[in-house]
Amino acid sequence: MLKSLATIAGLSLAVAAGTAAADEIQPHQFKVLGTWSSLSQYKNYEAPFWTETLSANTDGQMSGEIVSISVMGLKGYETLNLLQNGVFDMGNMVVAYVTGSTPEMEGIDLAGVATDMASARANADAYRDVINARLAEQNLIMLAHYPFGRQFVFCQDEFDGLAGLKGRKIRTSSATHADFLSGAGVTNVTIAFGEVVPAIQNGVVDCAVTGAIPAYDASWHEVINYVGELPINMGMAGLYANLSKWQSLDEASRAALAEQISNWEDATWTNYVTEENEGLACLTGDDAGCSKGDAVDMTLIPMTEADSAQARDILQSHVFPGWLERCGDADCASPWNATIGAANGLSIQ
């Protein structure tokens, strides 16, 4: 039976009635590693929490000194190792970037499972303890999860839904993306996010996968004309901590921090849904719905019933088998079937 988060962490993230008084909280400044400094998640959610919100809500007793992987010259894959080694106390990173030694984590956001934010959050809530049971073995804990947004396929040339991607070269950013698009007959190409525009210009790739807001912020519209409405997955991210550091906090401080993180998680999910919808509006010519700048004229390829049916077939034929292969001897299927699978009427055989 999986350990509960309370057992793993010494305190559940579910906050007990009442809030620790400020005079009971011990002063703490946490060393925090954030994601990419140019993206909305860092600018609007990660950095403000540690530098403003946490201090304001604890009468200045707790705060964080956050630095992005961009400033550090990191790729993101190093995040959990840096937490394990105590270089940072807390760290934010997209799940797909930190699953190398813990493939069970991929289960929170497998391609082809969730197509909307509400389902994605319910799945993540259900699966959190599965992840933490595994992370505890590495002296780590996931304190929160949040979305980097639905991951769409963007192409230079028009395509007819999911089936129309067959034969194209597509930049993917995770193993589960690659599994899914391989099932659609795509050639997967791995390149850095910042290299997508020149790669499109030079014919290295025909299409690329990312979220609406990153695509708009990175000016993909300069070389890309079409975006598919079918989301591959949600680009789930997590806030992780060194477990020893977390457990070493006095009870009042840990309770206060847990409450603030829980509130931050709720707000991030709620606000990002609105922000992502604005990203799509900015990409597809909706000036009234775009406050980020000038709306551009990408064409949205509608999601069809045929797309949904093909996606479910690919989930069974390519996504599940690819994940289980990466899991090796680990039993990934049973806990997934009992949580996300049960909630979505799916089963890994």
Image (cartoon, helix red, strand yellow):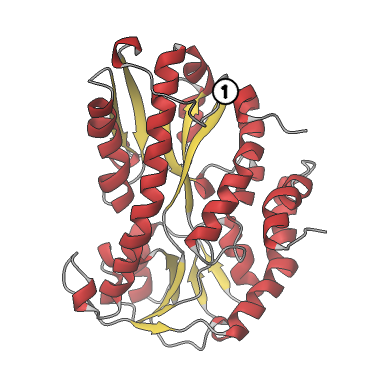
Instruction: Depth check: give the residue in front, 197 or 231.
Output: 231
**Is residue 37 shown to the viewer in this render?**
no
241 relative to 348, above or below: above
Q: Which residue lies furthest to the right in this view?
A: 349
Q: Position of residue 197 (x, y in %)?
A: 32, 68
State the residue at coordinates (27%, 17%).
61
Q: Name the residue under label 1.
A: 9
Instruction: Depth check: give the residue in front, 317 or 60.
Output: 60
Identify the secondary structure beneath mark 1: helix
Q: Residues within 10 Å of mark 1 (few under 14, many from 20)?
A: many
Quarter occupied by the C terminus: bottom right
Q: Position of residue 184 (x, y in %)?
A: 62, 77
Q: Position of residue 282 (x, y in %)?
A: 26, 72
Q: What residue type is labelled 1?
A: Ala
Q: Which quarter of the figure has residue 215?
A: bottom left
Quarter occupied by the N terminus: top right
State the residue at coordinates (64%, 50%).
107
Q: Where is residue 53 in the image (x, y as percent from the top left)?
A: 26, 33
Report whether 136 appears left or right of 322: left
State the residue at coordinates (39%, 23%).
19
Instruction: Depth check: give the residue in front, 225 or 344.
Output: 344
Instruction: Depth check: give the residue in front, 214 or 348.
Output: 348
115 relative to 265, above or below: below
Q: How many marks?
A: 1
State the residue at coordinates (46%, 35%).
79
